[in-house]
Image (cartoon, rainbow, N blue to C red):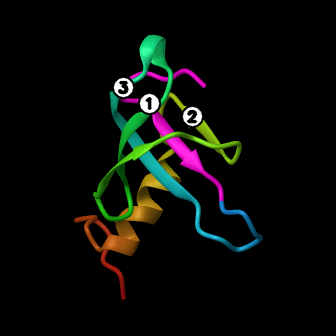
Amino acid sequence: MRAEVGEWLIVEGAHLGDHRYKGQIIEVRGPNGEPPYLVRWLDDDHVSLLYPGPDAHREHSLPHHLKLGARLRRGTDPEVRPS
């Protein structure tokens, strides 16, 4: 995998119903866009160093519905109030 700063990593759950992790690449530490990547995770804003496995793929931009879902779980979307 080759990626650039600003792209999104999506890590699928291993089993049906498992959580999908979404994070933005904030630093590429390998040569020529290769891993490892420093990733800020959308769900809780923590940062980790990641060597993506076969369950990961990258996106140039994150679809709006994925951004909204994470903000609702965190309760940080100013326009949508969780009940």
Which residue in the structure is indicated by mark 2? 58
Q: Let me know if residue 5 is in the magenta part.
A: yes
Which residue in the structure is indicated by mark 3? 29
Which kind of residue does numbered mark 3 sit on? Answer: Arg
> Secondary structure of the magenta portion, mostly?
loop
In the picture, the quarter occupied by the C terminus is: bottom left
- The one nearer the camera, 34 or 82, is 34
Distance Cα–Cα, label 3 vs label 2 = 16 Å
Of callouts 1 and 2, which one flags the residue occurring earlier in the amino acid sequence?
1
Q: Which residues are magenta?
A: 1-12
Q: Secondary structure at mark 1?
A: loop
Which kind of residue does numbered mark 2 sit on? Answer: Arg
Query: Which residue does the image show at 47% across and 48% down from the upper left?
Result: 64
- The one nearer the camera, 81 or 14, is 14
Which kind of residue does numbered mark 1 sit on? Answer: Glu
Which residue in the structure is indicated by mark 1? 7
Can you give x and y, in whole percent of width and height, for residue 56 in the image?
A: 63, 44
Of callouts 3 and 2, which one flags the residue occurring earlier in the amino acid sequence?
3
